[in-house]
Amino acid sequence: MRYHVLHATEYQYEQPVQTARHLLHLVPQPLPWQALERQSLRIEPEPTTHMRSADPFGNPVDRVEFAAPHDHLRVESELIVAVGDRPWLATASDGPAWERVRDALDYHAALLGEAEADAQRMRFESPGVRVKRELEEYAAPSFGAGRPVIDAARDLMRRIHAEFRYDPDATEVGTSVVEVLENKHGVCQDFAHLMIGCLRSRGLAARYVSGYLRTDPLPGQARMTGSDASHAWVAVFVPEAGWIEFDPTNDCLADERHIVLAWGRDFGDVSPLRGVIQGGGEHTLKVGVTVMPEGDGVKFTTDQSRGAA
C-alpha cells in the first residue's frame, strides 16, 4: 500500500515565546517493508536553524531552534510512504518458550549478538514505564511455564483489548501505567505502555512504536481530513525472528496498515514534537492527522521533498 499522510500540529501562545528548541519525530523509519517516497515539512515561523540527524535509537529527528519572538508554531508534515507486510507475518511461528527468550537476553557481553545487545536497553523500566509488581501479576496468566513467547504476547494483547476501554478523556500524557491498570481505560499510548510494562516485568525486551494507522470511514461516508490521530503499539524482541509488533488497541499484529515513525523506550523518547521554550504563558494545541491510500482524490502539495535546512 502507498499512503498519503498529513500531520499538522499548531500551538497558539498567550504571550510571545522568546526562544525555543524542538525535536520533531516526523520522518518514517527506513525499513525493509517501508519506504518514504516523498515528504514536505513546513514550519511556521521559519526556524533560525534546522538540522536533521538520528536520535539514540536510530530514528530520524529534526532539530529546530527559534531565536526570534513568535506567538504561534505550526508544523505540517506531508508524505507519501509505501508499506508492505512485515516479513515475519508469513514466517514467524509462535517462537521459543518465553523463558528461553528471557534467559537468552541475560547480560553476558561476550555471548550476546548485536541484536540481543541492542535489545537489552528495552528490558528495563523507563521514565514512562515503571516496572511494578502489579504488572507482573497482571501478566502472569499469559505466561505459563513453557508457553511460546509470541503466543504468550498475543494472549496478553488480547486480554488488554478485551478488558480495557478506549476512552480519550480518561488519561493524560503523564498518567502512570499503574493508574491505567487500576482504572481499566485509556488510549493507544496507555495500552502500549501497559503491555510494555507487563512484558518487561517478565524479563522480555519490549519497545514503544509510534506511527500512523490507516482507518477507514463508515460505509457511504467520506474520509474527513484531520480526523485520524497518531498511533502507538508494541514490539517484542524474539531472537532470530527480530522485533514482532503487537497492537493491543486493535488486537492485531502490525501489518500494512501500520506506518512506523519511530521507536524508543516509551512515548517520551518519540513524541512527534517536544521541546523547551522561554516565555509563551498558557497555550492551546491543535493536532490533525489524516492517513489515506494514495489516489483517494488528494494531490500532494509539493513535488519536492524538503530535508534539513
Image: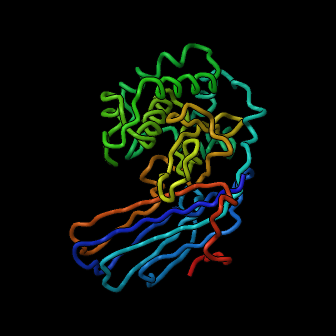
Question: Measuring 42% from the left and 78% from the top, which residue is drawn there?
Answer: 65
Question: Measuring 46% from the left and 75% from the top, which residue is drawn there?
Answer: 64
Q: Does the image show residue 99?
A: no
Outermost residue toward the front in this view: 220
- The answer to whether 140 is drawn above or below residue 72 in the figure is above
Q: Position of residue 269 (x, y in %)?
A: 46, 54
Question: Measuring 48% from the left and 66% from the top, which residue is drawn there?
Answer: 24
Q: Does the image show residue 152?
A: yes
- The answer to whether 42 is drawn above or below residue 290 in the figure is below
In the image: residue 96, left or right of residue 135: right
Q: What sort of colour scheme is used for the picture? A: rainbow
- The answer to whether 208 is drawn above or below residue 281 in the figure is above
Outermost residue toward the right in this view: 91
Q: Looking at the picture, tell me which residue is in the foreground, 112 or 6.
A: 6
Q: Position of residue 289 (x, y in %)?
A: 50, 57
Q: Which quadrant would the C terminus be assigned to in this image?
A: bottom right
- The answer to whether 185 is drawn above or below residue 143 in the figure is below
Q: Looking at the picture, tell me which residue is in the foreground, 150 or 233.
A: 233
Q: Looking at the picture, tell me which residue is in the foreground, 161 or 152.
A: 161
Q: Looking at the picture, tell me which residue is in the foreground, 280 or 81.
A: 81
The image quarter in which residue 164 lies: top left
Question: Measuring 39% from the left and 68% from the top, which residue is drawn there?
Answer: 10
Q: Position of residue 114 (x, y in %)?
A: 68, 46
Q: Position of residue 72 (x, y in %)?
A: 34, 75
Outermost residue toward the top in this view: 145
